[in-house]
Image (cartoon, helix red, strand yellow):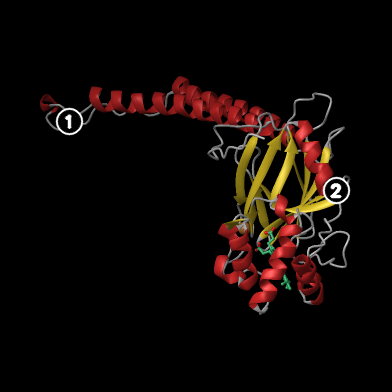
Amino acid sequence: MESRILTPSIFSPASVPAEIIVEYTTLVLAICAVIFVVVSSLIVYCVARFRERADDNGREPPQIYGGGRIELAWTVAPVLIVAVLFVVTARTILTLQKDEPPPGSLQITATGHQWWWEFDYADLGFVTANELHLPLMDDTSAGPAFLNLESQDVIHSFWVPQLSGKMDLIPNRTNHLWIAPTESGVYVGQCAEYCGTQHANMLLRVVVEPRADFERWVREQQRPATNDSAVSVAVGRAVFEETACVSCHSVRGTPANGTFGPDLTHLMSRTTLGAGVATNDRAHLIEWITSPDHLKPGARMPAMQLEPAQILAVVDYLESLQ
Ligand SMILES: [Cu+2]
């Protein structure tokens, strides 16, 4: 898949809702620009045309009170403008906000945690973290992606500027958002509601890929964890399963079934660690397991105080989770 990180600007939309938002924004900006030009030209004209002149001799100009026609004009014109803005806004909101999944949509539950994202593809049978994969909407018979947004702790907000507007994730409530991606690529986003110390490192990536690539990714995620029999991997797996790692992390097909931290079944299929704080490679894995605080101060994962040899073995095990 061609991988390019695009500048996250709402003015380069890559999905249907984002396009609708840009059209709406452009229209409102255009109306405001016209009002600005008209009002400021009138002000400049009046300042120049009616300024004080030498032959005024300090006399006040004639003071006029009331004026039916002009008052009617400056009441009717703004009412019409507000009416147009109201209708356009209402129509846009109705199109963007859907509480029920459209037919054929791919449903994903996105849960905000301090400070990472959980993505549960329940209908497909797997859970992943921080990197959302979506199929390109090239097949018109398929529905869009429909996200159920929830929170495990405090209020977070899902925002990928090029794909959709912001939507809050609120504890004990489910909000909805739909995305119909129109261009392949990797789109970056982040939590848009202050949620604690590491709010700024609660990044997310959305990988939009052609349907065949997406389906291949789904099949890989659906597999249980690979069972690598190399000695160091087995040693690392034993350390992982005998320490508290398993009470916070899941590795499907093994006794590890914690849900406090990200699912690690296919950890190595992700490009970043700790919700975008570091690239997912051996050096960062070692650093992360030694002390998550190094990379992400305040992270909700404790430094596990393992022996250096145990850390290397655990990392061998993690690297086997392809
Ligand atoms: Cu946040």
Describe residue 144's horizontal placement relative to residue 25 as left or right: right
Question: Where 211 falls versus 245 (above or below)?
Answer: above
Kindly identify the amino acid type of the residue bearing the numbered disc 1.
Arg
Residue occupied by mark 2: 222
Query: Marks 2 and 1: which is nearer the front?
Result: 2
Q: Secondary structure at mark 1?
A: loop
Q: Secondary structure at mark 2?
A: helix
x 69%, y 51%: residue: 270
Describe residue 55's horizontal placement relative to residue 76 as left or right: left
Give the Cα distance between marks 2 and 1.
87 Å
Describe residue 153's horizontal placement relative to residue 250 as left or right: left
x 79%, y 32%: residue: 212
Residue 224 screen position, x and y as percent:
86, 54
Residue occupied by mark 1: 59
Kindly identify the amino acid type of the residue bearing the numbered disc 2.
Gln
The crowding category of the residue bearing disc 1, from other C-alpha atoms within 10 Å (few below 14, some 14 to 19, many at least 20), is few
